[in-house]
Image: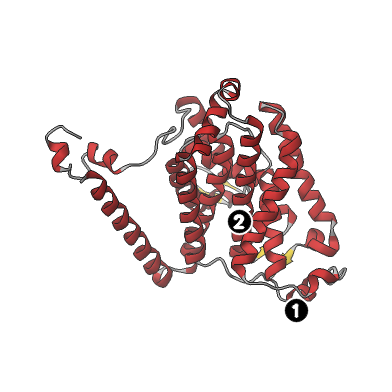
Amino acid sequence: MKLARTHLLSLAAVAVLAAFLFVADTWFDAFTIRVMNLSAIYIVLALSLNLVNGFTGLFSLGHAGFMAVGAYTCALLTMSPEQKEANFFLAPIVPWLAHVTIPFVPALIAGGLVAALLGVLIGAPVLRLKDDYLAIATLGFGEIIRVVLTNTQTITNGALGLKGLPEFASTAAVWACAALAVLFMVALTRSSYGRAMKAVRDDEIAAGAMGVNVFRVKVMSFAASSFMAGVGGALLGHLLTTIDPKMFTFMLTFNILLVVVLGGIGSITGSVVAAIVVTIFMELLRFLDGPLNLLVFQTEGRPGLRMVVFSILLMAVVLFRQRGLMGNREFSWSMLSRAGLLPKSEKGKHGLA
């Protein structure tokens, strides 16, 4: 009875969310829809970083590099020959890419797969490192990827980037990817692979003694995280319709890490909630980057001031609530019932649930 009630509530929640997205896509203005879709992309990216940092215990800082690989791969596969010719005016694109155009969904998957392949190639040597050494190594590889993209003029158009990408990242597309990312994370964490990842996170030596192939678990986690990062980067590129190497700096990784820490390292629910909240507040606080006319004094424009606010917020979380918004807990309908926001089941009223 309790399980059936949970399934009904979950289906009702999905239906309400789908209805809200349909209404929003029809009636909301373009800016609001853009922020809403950006929230969905940040859900994918936060879950991907939480997979490797929170569930496997690997401190990786190279996420922006894998996003860049996915974004460029998907963009080059979806652009028409005319669009490529218009972008590559300093040096022509390589012939084997000039006339390649495939639908968005296969290109999106290809972007994720290329990022995952790169994750395996990078992870094989660096995942033998630990803690700060691993963070420095992955950060260095992320910067190497960005430099390579800047200097491969005939493939990526160099520092000029790619403009006029097809607007394939619709509301339905980005929120479908966010939903699939959540489902994948839930299924993974409940599987034997997910339990092995948590075992490696908690104690590598004990996990190895119990028969867990620690290195293989790390590489698999890193590859899955890279795949999701590549998909997120591709969605971001097709949402903004332009990409260039300057987009994929360490600051982008910092933004995603901020979401993960605020939501709770090791919490799927925390990543989802924090991704939406942080994305919305980043737009609401955008006025801080411009001139401020206060009652007492006036200030000139200070670009990046809103990131100072979020950095202070991150410091406050680290100091006073180190486990983030959700800690390592997950949302459940029983949680709302205990809080009095949902009526308790008949079974629960008699103290049996």
In space, the residues marked 2 and 1 are separated at their CA atoms by: 25 Å
Q: What is the secondary structure assignment of the residue under circle 2?
A: helix
Residue 54 position by quadrant? top right
Task: Please count the marks in the image.
Answer: 2
Residue, x 59% and y 70% (percent of image)?
167
The circle drawn on residue 231 is 2
Residue 120 in view, yes or no:
yes
| Of callouts 2 and 1, the N-terminal one | 1
Q: How crowded is mark 2: few (under 14 residues within 10 Å), some or many (20 or more)?
A: many
Q: Which residue carries the number 1 mark?
A: 82
Q: Which amino acid does label 2 sit on?
A: Val
Q: Where is residue 247 in the image (x, y as percent from the top left)?
A: 69, 53
Could you say which quadrant of the image residue 88 lies in? bottom right
Depth check: give the residue in front, 247 or 166: 166
Relative vertical location of residue 206 with respect to residue 152 in this rendering, above or below = above
Quick check: can you spot residue 308? no
Residue type (three-letter) at the residue carrying disc 1: Glu
User: Considering the image in quadrants, where does the C terminus appear?
Assistant: top left
Q: In this view, does 59 lie to the left or right of 138?
A: left
The image shows residue 186, relative to residue 195, as above or below, that is below
**At which x and y percent is residue 351?**
15, 32
Specify how the rendered protein is coloured: secondary structure
Q: Which dot marks residue 153? A: none
**Disc 1 on helix, strand or loop?**
helix
